[in-house]
Image (cartoon, rainbow, N blue to C red):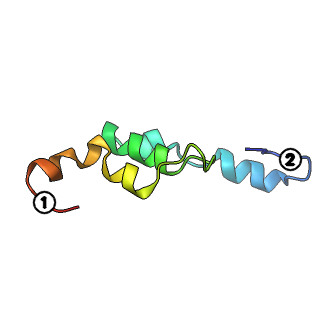
Amino acid sequence: MDWPRPDTTPSSHKWVKGLKKLENIVIEADFLDLLKKCLDYDPNKRLKAEEALDHPFFASLRANGQVI
């Protein structure tokens, strides 16, 4: 991602630096991994919906026979 750009305002820098990291908000490892892969900036690397449903995070639902 091309950020910050030369025209990025100081208030934008301050706001972004004040954001909490995803790792500090989401503590469950499989869910954090799923989120990171779904939110990847590069669309070629980003998980597709079908790939996301095969992620280990959903394994417990599949093991319990729940439909995803």
User: In the rendered structure, are the residues bearing label 2 and label 1 in contact, judged by CB atoms less than 8 Å apart?
Assistant: no
Mark 1 belongs to which amino acid?
A: Gln
Report the residue that reaches farthest toward the right: 6
Q: Give the residue pinned by disc 2.
A: 5
The reply to whether residue 28 is visible in this rendering is: no
Picture coordinates of residue 62, whole percent (x, y)? 16, 51
Instruction: Identify which residue is drawn at 11% across, 47% down.
Output: 63
Numbered disc 1: secondary structure: loop
Picture quarter with the C terminus? bottom left
Q: Nearer the viewer, residue 67 or 36?
A: 67
Q: Which mark is residue 19?
A: none
Q: Nearer the viewer, residue 26 or 1?
A: 1
Numbered disc 2: secondary structure: loop
Picture coordinates of residue 67, whole percent (x, y)? 17, 62
Left or right: residue 3 versus residue 19 is: right
Left or right: residue 3 versus residue 6 is: left
Left or right: residue 2 versus residue 46 is: right
The CA distance from mark 2 to mark 1 is 46 Å
Left or right: residue 15 versus residue 24 is: right
Instruction: Identify which residue is drawn at 76% across, 55% down.
Output: 12
Q: Give the residue pinned by disc 1.
A: 66
The reply to whether residue 64 is visible in this rendering is: yes
Instruction: Identify which residue is drawn at 8% across, 52% down.
Output: 64
The numbered mark, 2 or 1, whose residue comes first in the sequence reads 2
Q: Nearer the viewer, residue 65 or 3?
A: 65
Mark 2 belongs to which amino acid?
A: Arg
Report the residue that reaches farthest toward the bottom: 67
Picture coordinates of residue 48, whole percent (x, y)? 46, 53
Count neighbours of disc 2 (C-alpha within 10 A) and say few if under 14, some if 14 to 19, many if 20 or more. few
Count neighbours of disc 1 (C-alpha within 10 A) and say few if under 14, some if 14 to 19, many if 20 or more. few
